[in-house]
Image (spheres, helix red, strand yellow):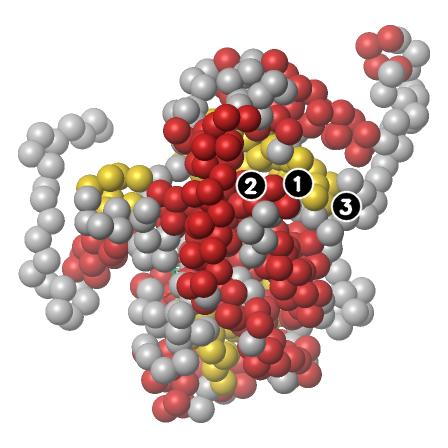
């Protein structure tokens, strides 16, 4: 079960942190936000209480496990959750293990960015005869996804393989091109609920199929999310982690701290910070308020890796602009640990001998937390007793709910992303998509190009 320690968000632990009075001033407001979000019954809550989505994945378990590789094709909300799950819940050398060592589960690869070097390397690595391609797109119209989809269709064609035996779509239940192709060509398709946007979809088949394919206990994942939701709905906000996270970020934002750093002290949890970045950025970065005023709202999410970024970012966080809160992700017990032997007797090194790598990692986290506090820089810890599916499920739910709460508190719509659209349409125009030929976009007046 995840634990939260928000002590250093507050006075007196951190000078300039949240005072008793400041917290009291938003207590009712946050409580009402919790009530409203619960009442609105968002799609990310519905999906975990509707068993049919997990069943749809379990129903094809045997077929999926007949392959050696899964290639997930999707981008943004259609990939970040699955990347986070795979990185957190499989060992770092997963793709190098034999199928037997993987207990029959699949190696996992992602085609996200349309970087040809990266895509070519993935395609070099897999044998299409042993590969299932999971093409994920809610809209069924995202250029990057459709480009990769056609690349792998071409590959299957060259190898004389039947697409219906190697492709599954994960898409809107009714609308969009992928749904149409699935019907026309009898390609299997899993549903993404209509009321669920990409960045909130990790606990739908979008994340569940890739997770199941690489051996994650998806029931535990959903159970974790369900149990977390019960806490998210608690109107006693001091017992509600999502409400406390939202209240703290909201209050610190009022003090000018509108940068939210997430800093896992764990490589396996690092991709959770990528998932969080998208959720926080796309949900809360909005031009208009709910009543149509221009507000240019938002908090900027940043990711950092402990301890690596202590040697890169922490100088800035301690002494630079006081515009950040830092959320540490701590692992209490790693799956493995390594004893540091005593090789030299010199004082500068001998203190490390006999300790474990995890001891050093944890001391560094505490050292960073305390140093930040002494500089008046607020932080909080989310504590993973171990890295397991149940706790990762909890993490997703707490952050989805906290994001919805932040949307309510900031009076913006956290579920749309109009700011992504213009860039997409210009790309369509540049790539010659029918219907977008005459799209106008301004050329720079003064060109500054240096050869
Ligand atoms: O959160 C979102 O809605 C976006 O990030 C989408 O997930 C992303 O643009 C991919 O969209 P789609 O799943 O429609 O291909």
Q: Are marks 2 and 1 in contact (CB under 8 Å)?
A: yes
Name which quarter of the figure residue 355 lies in.
top right
- The secondary element bearing badge 2 is classed as helix
How crowded is the residue under tag 3: few (<14 C-alpha within 10 Å), some, or many (20+)?
some
Residue 236, given in percent of the width and then of the height, sits at: 59, 47
* Numbered disc in front, either 2 or 1: 2
330 versus 420 height, above or below: above
- Whether residue 111 is visible here, answered yes or no, is no
Q: Residue 145: which numbered mark, if any?
A: none
321 versus 1 height, above or below: above
* Numbered disc in front, either 3 or 2: 2
Left or right: residue 346 compared with residue 135: right
Q: Which residue is mark 3?
A: 385
- Whether the residue under disc 3 has CB within 8 Å of ligand 1: no
- Whether residue 385 is visible here, answered yes or no, is yes
How crowded is the residue under tag 2: few (<14 C-alpha within 10 Å), some, or many (20+)?
many
Q: Which residue is mark 2?
A: 244
How crowded is the residue under tag 1: few (<14 C-alpha within 10 Å), some, or many (20+)?
some
Residue located 36% across and 61% down the image: 144
Residue 300, given in percent of the width and then of the height, sits at: 40, 36
Q: Which residue is nearer to you in this view: 61 or 161?
A: 61
Q: Which residue is mark 1?
A: 4
């Amino acid at each position: 079960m995840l634990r939260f320690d928000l002590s250093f968000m507050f006075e007196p632990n951190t000078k300039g942190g949240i005072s008793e009075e400041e917290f009291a001033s938003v207590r009712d407001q946050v409580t009402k936000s919790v009530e409203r979000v619960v009442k609105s019954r968002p799609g990310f809550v519905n999906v975990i209480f509707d068993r049919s989505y997990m069943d749809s994945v379990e129903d094809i378990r045997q077929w999926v496990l007949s392959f050696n590789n899964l290639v997930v094709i999707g981008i943004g909300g259609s990939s970040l959750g699955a990347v986070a799950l795979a990185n957190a819940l499989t060992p770092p050398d997963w793709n190098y293990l034999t199928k037997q060592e993987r207990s029959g589960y699949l190696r996992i690869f992602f085609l996200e960015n349309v970087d040809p070097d990266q895509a070519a390397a993935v395609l070099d690595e897999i044998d299409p005869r042993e590969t299932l391609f999971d093409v994920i797109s809610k809209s069924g119209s995202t250029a990057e996804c459709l480009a990769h989809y056609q690349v792998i269709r071409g590959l299957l064609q060259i190898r004389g393989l039947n697409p219906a035996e190697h492709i599954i779509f994960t898409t809107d239940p009714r609308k969009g091109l992928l749904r149409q192709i699935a019907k026309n060509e009898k390609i299997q398709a899993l549903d993404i609920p209509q009321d669920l946007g990409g960045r909130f979809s990790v606990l739908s088949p979008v994340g569940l199929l890739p997770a199941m394919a690489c051996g994650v206990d998806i029931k535990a994942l959903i159970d974790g999310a369900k149990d977390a939701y019960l806490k998210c709905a608690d109107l006693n906000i001091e017992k509600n982690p999502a409400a406390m996270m939202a209240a703290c970020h909201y209050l610190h934002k009022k003090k000018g701290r509108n940068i939210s750093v997430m800093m896992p002290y764990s490589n396996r949890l690092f991709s959770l910070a990528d998932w969080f970045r998208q959720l926080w950025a796309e949900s809360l970065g909005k031009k208009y308020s709910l009543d149509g005023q221009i507000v240019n709202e938002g908090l900027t999410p940043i990711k950092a890796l402990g301890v690596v970024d202590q040697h890169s970012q922490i100088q800035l966080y301690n002494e630079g602009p006081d515009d950040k809160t830092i959320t540490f992700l701590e692992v209490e017990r790693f799956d493995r640990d390594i004893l540091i032997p005593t090789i030299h007797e010199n004082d500068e090194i001998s203190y490390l001998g006999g300790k474990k790598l995890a001891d050093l990692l944890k001391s560094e986290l505490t050292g960073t937390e305390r140093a930040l506090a002494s500089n008046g820089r607020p932080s909080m810890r989310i504590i993973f007793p171990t890295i397991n599916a149940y706790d990762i499920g909890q993490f997703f739910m707490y952050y989805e709910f906290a994001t919805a709460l932040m949307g309510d508190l900031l009076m913006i719509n956290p579920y749309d992303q109009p700011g992504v659209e213009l860039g997409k349409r210009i790309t369509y125009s540049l790539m010659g998509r029918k219907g977008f030929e005459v799209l106008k976009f301004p050329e720079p007046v003064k060109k500054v190009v240096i050869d």
